[in-house]
Image (cartoon, rainbow, N blue to C red):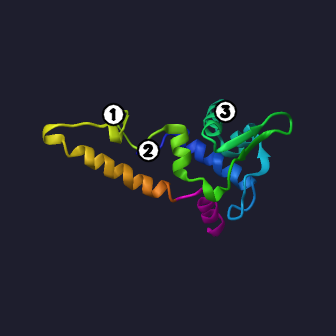
Amino acid sequence: MYVSARADYALRAMLAVAEAAGSPAAGGPGGDLVKAASLAESQDIPLSFLQGILLDLRRAGLLHSARGTEGGYALTRPATGITVGDVLRAVGGALTSVRGLPADRAGYHGVAAGLRDVWLAVDGAIALVVDRTTLADLLADRAAAP
């Protein structure tokens, strides 16, 4: 698995929006709306790059936006219901790729036939971790750290 700048930025932005929503344990959708410029500044992300990421997150149903001077972005559901895997898939597609294709589309023959099973196992192990880790978990870890 390769974590691109886009995936890293998307997770950082989602965590900042989740934090603005209030308590991650109780957190519901809504909370304070966070402006893209504020997210870019607080997370040190180029604004033009972030805007494309926010669009992908909105299209994936993870964020909603409001226009206008009081507008911004908010989570569409509680931070407890959004996983790292949700965010990664929204901005990057498949979690694991082989030569640019999703692991389940890798095909081999002859002596290399067993490689497909290895790549699928790697994909499954990654999915196990990222699909069990929520934004709320990450915020709680931060709050618990000394």
Question: Disc 3 designates what residue?
Answer: 51
Element on which disc 2 rests: loop
Within the magenta stretch, is there residue 67? no
Q: Residue 143, how many percent across, how many down?
A: 66, 66
Q: Residues within 10 Å of mark 3 (few under 14, many from 20)?
A: some
- Disc 1 from disc 2: Cα separation: 13 Å
Q: Residue 130, how many percent across, how many down?
A: 49, 54
- Considering the image in quadrants, where does the N terminus appear? top left
Q: Residue 139, how many percent across, how many down?
A: 64, 60
Q: Residue 146, how many percent across, how many down?
A: 63, 70
Q: Which quadrant of the structure image shows residue 107?
A: top left
Question: Disc 1 designates what residue?
Answer: 99
Mark 3 or 1, nearer chain start: 3
Between disc 2 and disc 3, the foreground one is 2
- Disc 3 from disc 1: Cα separation: 28 Å
Which labelled disc corresponds to residue 65? none
Residue extending furthest right?
Answer: 69
Q: Which quadrant of the structure image shows residue 137?
A: bottom right
Q: Amino acid at mark 2?
A: Leu
Within the magenta stretch, is there residue 140? yes
Residue visible at 69% across and 47% down in the picture: 76
The magenta-colored residue range is 133-146
Mark 2 or 3, nearer chain start: 3
Question: Disc 2 designates what residue?
Answer: 95
Reply above or below: 27 against 94: below
Residue visible at 13% across and 38% down in the picture: 110
